[in-house]
Image (tube, coloured by chain):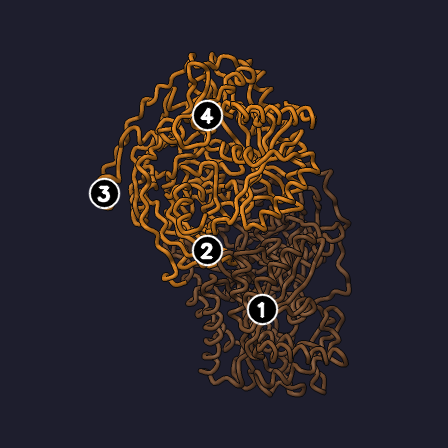
Chain colours: A brown, B orange
Amino acid sequence: MEDSQRIVPEAYAPDPADQESLDVWGFRDTAFRAREDGVVELTGHRYGLCGEELADLLPWVHDTIHPGVTPHDLNPPSYPPAIPAPRQHPDFLEEIRKVLAEDQVTDDAELRLRHGHGHTQEEMYAIKYGALPRVPDLVVYPTEESHVVALVEAARRHDVCLIPYGGGTNVTDALRCPEEEERLIASVDMSRMNQIEWIDPENRMACIQAGAVGRHIVEQLGKYGFTIGHEPDSIEFSTLGGWVATHASGMKKNRYGNIEDIVVDVTVVTARGVLERHYLVPRESIGSGDSRRWVFGSEGAFGIVTKAVVKIFPLPEVQTYGSIIFPEFSDGVAFLEELTHHATPPASVRLVDNAQFQLSQMLKGRRTGLKKVVSAVEKFFVLRVKGFEADKMCACTLVFEGTKEEVAAQERATYRIAAKHRGMKAGAENGERGYQLTFGIAYIRDWIMNHYLIAESFETSVPWSEVGTLCERVKQRLRDEHAKRGLPGKPYVTCRVTQVYHTGVAVYFYFAFFFKGVENPSAVYSELEHAARDEVIRCGGSLSHHHGIGKIRRGFLPRVVSPGVLEWNRRIKEAVDPTNVFGCGNQNFADARED
Amino acid sequence: MEDSQRIVPEAYAPDPADQESLDVWGFRDTAFRAREDGVVELTGHRYGLCGEELADLLPWVHDTIHPGVTPHDLNPPSYPPAIPAPRQHPDFLEEIRKVLAEDQVTDDAELRLRHGHGHTQEEMYAIKYGALPRVPDLVVYPTEESHVVALVEAARRHDVCLIPYGGGTNVTDALRCPEEEERLIASVDMSRMNQIEWIDPENRMACIQAGAVGRHIVEQLGKYGFTIGHEPDSIEFSTLGGWVATHASGMKKNRYGNIEDIVVDVTVVTARGVLERHYLVPRESIGSGDSRRWVFGSEGAFGIVTKAVVKIFPLPEVQTYGSIIFPEFSDGVAFLEELTHHATPPASVRLVDNAQFQLSQMLKGRRTGLKKVVSAVEKFFVLRVKGFEADKMCACTLVFEGTKEEVAAQERATYRIAAKHRGMKAGAENGERGYQLTFGIAYIRDWIMNHYLIAESFETSVPWSEVGTLCERVKQRLRDEHAKRGLPGKPYVTCRVTQVYHTGVAVYFYFAFFFKGVENPSAVYSELEHAARDEVIRCGGSLSHHHGIGKIRRGFLPRVVSPGVLEWNRRIKEAVDPTNVFGCGNQNFADARED
């Protein structure tokens, strides 16, 4: 391939207004708050939800979870917590100073803290109401691949532990430092390796550095008429390197594929050298040359992804939204199954259960005038004329992308199949709102922690035949575990089907409870989440569809794979990283061997 | 998933009439022959070509390659060659006899020979006109997974080398025994592990033993209304285990995917235990649990695949064929690019160049009566009215599968885009003939060796922008190398684009020359093929799109991947197979380490 065909985009500089919070999810200018009058608002201007007056939310929380959630009764966080002093390693520092500039190395306490966690409830609870026992001792910011190579070499020579860091959005404790790690831990923050190196319009590829953030990739490729097609819920903050390391899935995977389908090639710096190809080809039949295999889902245990070549797609000629309501969740699942097996599903199709449908209704602003009347009429029609039950109905959001013809054909097939399963069209506006809600809703978790509500999401994948059973049994298990412990109020537990596959689906759960008066609420939450995962596995669900294993689910690995697989992992890790430079402790790679 | 949903098919027994040849490709009842009058025929009844009188073929060969190819001037093979005596290892034999019955172990000379090669020209020339210096010392036929486990354990304990054997159709010297191997070599023939264990219609999966042959899988699944969708050119003889081990591609991958897309789960017996999952899930985010990664394209170096769970698809509602002719190859490539990027390509789309188009015309039976007239009129129309040139035009064969609507939409888009690139519809009959020709044509190579013609295929994949250059330069390189050596007659070199991808295509070449009077023609052929591969790499082509690396292309690995990748392979191989039980010597896995 000749370089001359390639477009080299202008250097990219992030908008200085886009500051991210250190102590909570998201942008600094955006947060939920409960006004004195009980109305809830999302500050800032970034999301459709911003500026809406959410008057129904707290009353609904009172009915559904606990009446103790009020604007006045607060559980104020004490961020920042005590932060452990950094370990020193003057020889390592001296060596890396030879290649890194002054501003590429820091031991600032709050930055070290931030690099020592992701966004699990345990981690976020700890930094706000407790402490993290171990955080990185140093944060380094490479700006080019040679820096990463030098860092890995120095770490190997000086017996230092490196933990790669992308957007910090991880939810599997993968960024958490092993408490027992005695060596210096350096967090390798990839955020300054964030450029699109080139775009090849004819061969539909782009080479992108691993620290590039999803929203920047989309924005930049968009200028040239392309998109990457990968849109995980965390796209605003997560990075290409993180997507590869966690084996990520995007909301539009039906059209564009998951990360392993989108990545054409990847470069990884390891303790045994740099893994890369000398040139790019489409699919090939090669065992050894395909270094991609070793890094997808490796969660930092094998090396640092520095860049990847990804497929790019022309911006769709047409994008439309849609939504469908079903009388019951099982109707929706049957619809998804037929849609998957007998038609081409739209780019994104997500089915929320009744509890989540109700929540989404509470996240609507106050309606006035005609809108209020229309809403009331719609409600009357759905509940009285069509006979849907308010506590059973569920909804499906749809995003169609493609050429006019493709979208038209998909819309026809989708609504035709929906009608066979008692589905009723509920409009584009609801579809778009439901889809966009994902981004705003991510801010709720940290806010409600201040109001004694602890919440988290977890996910799985499961064959078609088990979807209904798994969803029901996992919810029931959480209700049972909640009751068994005599926890206050009612647990809120809800799920949605977020992805469809030939052989099954991905299911995403939210679970929350009121914790005022509960001792160690974060630990209690973890116990319940563990029980839920046990139930997931009993029901034939996977350990993870797209979040990963990290440290949070590693204990379950023997229930999923044979001893031979675990033995292979240990042997391979030892072979390619003999001094455990990449000592993050995720999965079972660095466990003691069964010799 | 509950077992009760699963269908367990009746035990499968192959048709005793389907005997395969030991010395040439294919079924024993099928072979090309040249009659006294120069007409060529394909014996038997299995293919559309059988019984046709191919009167034009030899005259065309005379013009195109060499006039010395005649029914009378033969180069008779001397199969079987001398076969090395088997090495003995009484302790190993004693141990495996404990689990294997009398008829599961053999040291029969011809069977050992057959298990020591695939179908490269070098191997086939050697068994007919030379000898193989090293073949397996023993052939074993496990009938269940526990036999494979016992074999691997015994091999490890007694320092024996195991080489897995599927359908024997390999074309990368992967089955050839390393000459320097001093240990006993046992070929593990998987053909008796050939059952479909279960079919799960709702979750669209089937569990199939690794030794099941493609045509049997298709036949059996078909009884239940399903297909696997994987149709490599070798489907009549190659096995599921072989497809996984070589990272195979099927002709209908546009609709069903390649083998890595179709396989949901796989079980592998290795020197460090059995790699398997305890239950089945759709896509998941897991590094360690995904034992699939280690085995796709591993070519026997890591273990023995015993079974796989694959996706199954309902038999298509509609299957139609089609064909298009283009004035020039570059028009056809431009058509394929637009079809791939702006529409949904049909299940199979293959573009043959002019030389291959000509050959396919010569493989038509004698036409009489009305057919002859129609053919002449068509020819007149194409060449005179439309202005196509007989020595430039090329053809594309199409197979559409899906629902009526899907097929109709694809046909419309395909022919509309073809017209933009000067393409002319050439009918369903030509499309079906072109597609089916693949199976009959496979018999030509062994037959023409008797007539002093040596031939072979090789393939690659390459980005869109380089397709034209690569095809032209590789052909020219072969013509130059042929001329440089003063070889007799003209070389026949032709290519087709067999697969399309988002970022590029797969290209398949045939190359043949007349070798009467040439010393060591097989070695000369290998030199030329090596030169062609050098040119492929210079043009940005991959080492292999679907044949694999084996031993034939391993020397090129350093031109494709970084030293780090090669180092990883050596380290991983050593870690998971420390005594090199799987000592086939493919790729660089067992090379000396760079310590």
Is there one chain holding both mark 4 and mark 1?
no
- In the rendered structure, the answer to whether residue B566 lies left or right of residue A8 reads left
Q: Which residue is mark 2?
A: B204
Amino acid carrying mark 2 in the image: Arg
Q: Which residue is mark 4?
A: B52
Is there one chain holding both mark 1 and mark 3?
no
Packing grade of label 4 (10 A; few <14, some 14-19, many >=20) is some
Q: Which residue is mark 1?
A: A423
In terms of secondary structure, where does tag 1 sit?
A: loop
Tally of marks: 4
Q: Which residue is mark 3?
A: B101
Quadrant of the image containing the N terminus of chain A? top right
Front position among marks 2 and 4? 4
Amino acid carrying mark 4 in the image: Glu
Front position among marks 4 and 1? 4
- Viewer-proximal residue among A443 and A182: A443
Tag 3, which chain? B
Amino acid carrying mark 1 in the image: Gly
Q: Position of residue B413 (x, y in %)?
A: 65, 44
Q: CA distance from mark 4 to mark 1?
A: 57 Å
Packing grade of label 2 (10 A; few <14, some 14-19, many >=20) is many
Front position among marks 3 and 2? 2
Q: Is there a contact, CB below 8 Å, between mark 4 and mark 1? A: no
Q: Position of residue B543 (x, y in %)?
A: 54, 35
Q: Classify A456 as above or below A409.
A: below
